[in-house]
Amino acid sequence: MNTIAPPTTSDQFVMLTDLLKHEDNLISLRTNWTLAVQALLFSAFASTVGLFEKFVFSTPTKTPIHAALFLLCGMGLLSCVAAFAGVQSAESQQVRLREWWEKTLPEADASRYPPLYPIDSIRSRLRASKYFIVLAAVWVTIFLIVCSSQELVIRSGAK
């Protein structure tokens, strides 16, 4: 009968650092993809606003271009919420891994291992997930501007 020996502290440290690297990679990938999507959405929004200059509608109220702007704002906001949830999940996992390591590491072995990066008050405020809150606030602000505008005209070129 084969029995598996429990992992040594060194093995646990290697597993811990591998898991922390994995979570960092997830955060990086989710952040990069979300920022790429946000850049495309902001470009599409600016291009759509530019259509107001080219088209004259019979009624100055909400137009099909407004609908496109609402849709872009919604997509931007939803992508921020999805990215926030994914990145927040990875950040929470990193915190749990750190807490597990601090409970598991025997005092005698503590000097043999390098310290993990600290999560202090400044770093906790600058986590990647916080940036998505700012982006979501930008999309909500843009949405409110579009809702409150009767006509969006960049230049008074329409005659």
Image (cartoon, grey):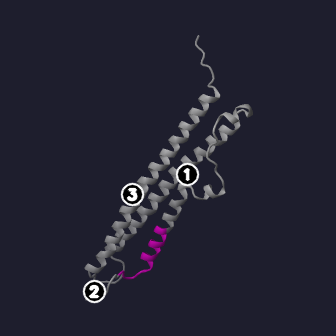
C-alpha gap between disc 3 and disc 1: 19 Å
Left or right? Give the position of 73 relative to 65. right
- Image quarter where the N terminus lies is top right
Tag 3 secondary structure: helix
Tell me the tag on residue 88: 1
| Residue 95 located left or right of residue 144 | right
Residue 115: percent from left, percent from top:
64, 42
Q: Secondary structure at mark 1?
A: helix
At label 2, which amino acid type do we have? Gly
- The residue where tag 3 is placed is 36
Q: Which residues are magenta?
A: 138-152
Q: Which residue is mark 2?
A: 157
Amino acid type, mark 3:
Ala
Q: Secondary structure at mark 2?
A: loop
Taking 99 as reference, is 158 above or below it? below
Our reading of the magenta stretch's main secondary structure is: helix
- Does the segment drawn in magenta span residue 155? no
